[in-house]
Image (tube, rainbow, N blue to C red):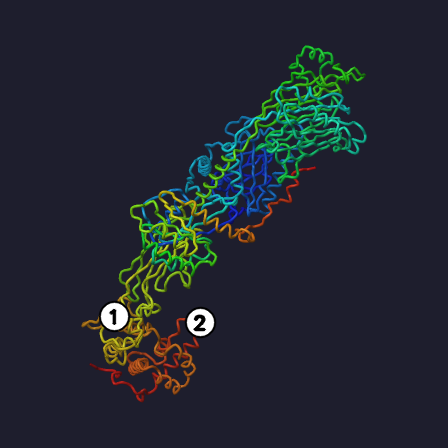
Amino acid sequence: MSTSQDLPGIIQAKLSSGEAAITVHEASLMQGWVRASRILALVEHENECALFIFISSRMPPEVFTDLAIERVIPVDADFKCEIDAGEQSVDVYVNISSRKLKLLFEMIPGLKTNNFVSEIMRSMEALSKRRGPPPEFQWLHKYSGSSNRNSADCVASSLDTSDDDAFKASKTEAEKMLDILDSPDIVVPRQSIAQGATPIAARESVIRHQMSMKEDDYTFTQTLRMFIGTWNVNGLPPSSSLTPWLASDLEPPDIYAIGFQELDLSKEAFLFNDTPREEEWRKAVMAGLHPGGKYRQVALVRLVGMMLILLVEEKHVKHVRNAAFETVGTGIMGKMGNKGGVAIRVEIHNTSICFVNSHLAAHVEEYERRNQDYHDICSRLSFSKFAPVKCIKDHDQIYWLGDLNYRITEVEINTVRDLINQNYFPALIQYDQLHRQRSQNNVFEGYHEGAITFKPTYKYDPGTDDWDSSEKNRAPAWCDRVLWRGDGIEQKEYRSHPILKTSDHKPVSALFDSQVRVIDVVKYRKVHEEVMKKLDKLENEFLPQVTVDNTEIIFDIVRYLEPQSQELIIANTGQVPVQFEFIKKLDDSKCCKEWLNIDPPVSFIMPGEKCDVKLEVFVDKKSAFKLNSGVDKLYDILVLHLEGGKDIFITVTGNYERSCFGSSLEALVHVSVPVREIPIGKLVELETTKEAPGGMEPYPIPKEIWFLVDHLYRHGLKKQNLFLLPGLHSELLAIRNWLDNGSSEPLPGSLHSIAEALLLLLDSTSEPIVPFNLQSVCLGASSNYLQCKQIVVQLPEYRKNVFLYLCFFLQELLSHANENGLDAKTLATVFGGIFLRDSPRPSARANSTVDRKKANFVYHFLVNDLSDYVVSKALHLGPSS
Amino acid sequence: MAKKTYDLLFKLLLIGDSGVGKTSILFRFSDDAFTSTFISTIGIDFKIKTVELRGKKIKLQIWDTAGQERFHTITTSYYRGAMGIMLVYDVTDERSFENIVKWLRNIDEHANEDVEKMILGNKCDIDGKRAVNKDRGEAIAREYGVPFLETSAKANTNIDKAFNDLATAILDKYAGKEPGDAPDRVMVDPRRGDTSRRSCC
């Protein structure tokens, strides 16, 4: 995936004015079982940020019309971004979630990804530090089909009629992807793969993502009764039993979260955070719990006067995991602990719960300061022992209790007391600062509070139920509150306990029936197994698959120098692009025998497409001898390898029609009949034993050479450019047939063809006329005729015969130089390469010096008198039997 | 790209005469399905399946080989690297049973020395045409010290057990060895050190 230089510019062009793309990044969206390319952009508009997810009709996009907006997710209080750091992986997984929407992106690790995620984190931080009303994201409404503000968390794009086709194509693709997500069977549309989607590699992150999507399938809910209590004790020690507060209900709760404020107002407590009150009140709590249950303290946290105790009924303790606590001071200098919050988080079964006890800023007019304290606690309180770090909002359920200190204002104190005396709380709540600030979305967004049906809990003359009678004559207020956030929470009670008179506050409690998700281990295993099975199935289905139309390629009759070809059709019947290659077998140096050529040997096929592979059999001098001598057969098994997948074996067979071409001189002199007439196997035997069948007197030279030379001697001595001009391929084949099959017809073909046939025949023998091992001696002797002569005399008999016979003939040709225009040097060059053929080994590479020496060697024999050589009479040119 | 849903990757191989049911055994194990039409495997194919053994997720990569005689030279080249080999014969085909010895010899010649082996007598659902008694299978298995099971891909008899047993044998052998035997893991730190910036205390 390469990022176009221009990507930010293209994205910017897609946006409206006033919207600025802060950062742009390419990522893969894990959708269901496939991974699809997306472009993510963090877009800012008047201090509000949103994450835009784009689909592009091509990657990378080239113009903004390539892009379609798939989703817009506002960076609001519900927006979460987590990096999956739990696993060492080659890729970075980023979870983006907003309410019910959960998206998993795969990104390539590196600076770009780091920067992108950092920018998202920064925008989330900016949001948490933001003061005043929360962002409304009005500017996103135009990206939303239904502009319902509250449900605009995830704005799905709607089809705009004015948009181009690329948009529609992308949209339908996205829809298909979503279908896959739900379909019980994995059917991944081929075209989506072709459009750049690739199967998800089975990984832990994907499994976790899948498991979290299927949570409902393996969890059931269990209702736990939660008792949440808060009391500002005004620095006083316990003076009476807490039973009337903590055990006022018939049924014992499952969980207690009890918060105190102003536990100790002494300087020591403030400065050294040390107080005997902690233990006094803790004991009082333990003594005051419901007698119907046995409770274990799970955690206790205190910051100066704020203390929070979490107690869990014994039978649930084993299901409580990952308990942690943190404190945040928001008092003097913005950090002292006289104000602030303490929190405990746990996971009970599969539900994460956070309890926050806070004491917010005092004084009637300081409600904004209280809002600020709330936001500070939210942004600064984090449970750092987790990776990624968990904040308050990262929990399924949050219970927020404490002396929030919001007052009743803008109403006469007497009116307040009158309304209280009439128990007419709905009217009074209108003047409650927390009520007002919440309705303006300035604080506690997303939290709920039950209807208040109890008298304000502040401020009383301690020890009485009388309103403050001090000089300050403070107006009554609902300072002490319990709010909650999350699913499956039902408030059963919300009340104060005026019977406890120790403090100038009355204790408050709220009782909840809260549903926690419990993992059914059996079902979990089953779902997990299913997910694994699906991934296995997917992985198997995404293995490269092809069919070949034929795994046994049969060539009927193959003749020397006569190419034949057949086509093999490889069809990609799988879901993924296939790279195929014909690979070599264990000890082979090539993927096929030398008489076979595969074109193309390597290629790439898209799903649904085909590739024609041409298999050509061509027997030339390189392979003919092996076929004639039985060392090799026209039989090969090709291994068609699919990269990352299976291998298919393709058998290639054919019948080679043996020929004098590609035989050895030694074998040919023993054959008195045309090669085709000797029984199959005989030639093989001859090549191995080099002995005449039935005691036949071998010819001094192969009759085939004689036929050709004799014809040229009779008819071609005056032919111009003999051995210099090529013959016709068809005539060469006819000459080959004539030699191999025998015929009463005259030798076919033009003189040039016959001359070339002679050269080809000499060139095709298993060894050249001068054996390979003598070549270097010959080259060394090439300047000295006598030495050359010495070598020739010592050549094996038939080779010497052929050599001299040809030299006689060439001298004869040169004697007609006036007519045929040939010269000794030219012929010496042509025959030098034939008589002194290079070894087929790659080390022996032709070069001009060697060629010149070869020509020199032959030249001696074309210009010197050869009559003193002792040769068989049969080698004399001219009419013979 | 390395895939990480598993703790270990085991490469297994199925060998045996043509037509004994190697492909069917694999198909039953990976797809839990069976088809009675015989399509000769012309090549080497594989499927993957993840199993959980002793609390470890183990990805099995199971290679199915062509059984035809003419491919033997080529298929033996795939033995190396296999951690477990299933030798399959057909209980209704005497010859395929006799060839087990030949297949065992092939393993000795071409496979890793410490490869785990298992002999399967497949098609044990067919009673009428049985040519090789279970005793004989057990006897040869005992002789060569190789575990033995009679299986039926058609009736889904002992298929899961066969693979689980073979994988367990490999697991037991590799247990205690260095984790270097595990599939290669690429160590990349996805900006873990950077996460602290999320909290601004």
Q: Residue furthest bottom?
A: A868
Report crowding for label 1: few under 14, some 14 to 19, many 20 or more residues within 10 A (C-alpha).
many
Q: If you read the primary sequence from the N terminus, does the residue marked by circle 2 or circle 1 appear first?
A: 1
Residue in front for this viewpoint, B162 or A558: B162
Helix, strand or loop at mark 2: loop
Is residue A810 in view? no
Residue in front for this viewpoint, A533 or A288: A288
Q: How many marks?
A: 2
Taking A201 as reference, is A552 above or below it?
Answer: below
Q: Which residue is mark 2?
A: A843
Percent x, y for residue A675?
25, 71
Q: Which residue is mark 1?
A: A735
Q: Which mark is residue A558?
A: none
Left-right relation of A593 to A218: left
Q: Are marks 2 and 1 in contact (CB under 8 Å)?
A: no
Percent x, y for residue A879?
21, 82
Percent x, y for residue A713?
25, 79
Residue in front for this viewpoint, A217 or A91: A217
Taking A853 as reference, is A635 above or below it?
Answer: above
Percent x, y for residue A456?
70, 17
Q: Amino acid at mark 2?
A: Ser
Taking A775 as reference, is A176 above or below it?
Answer: above
Quarter assignment of residue A420: top right
Quarter assignment of residue A672: bottom left
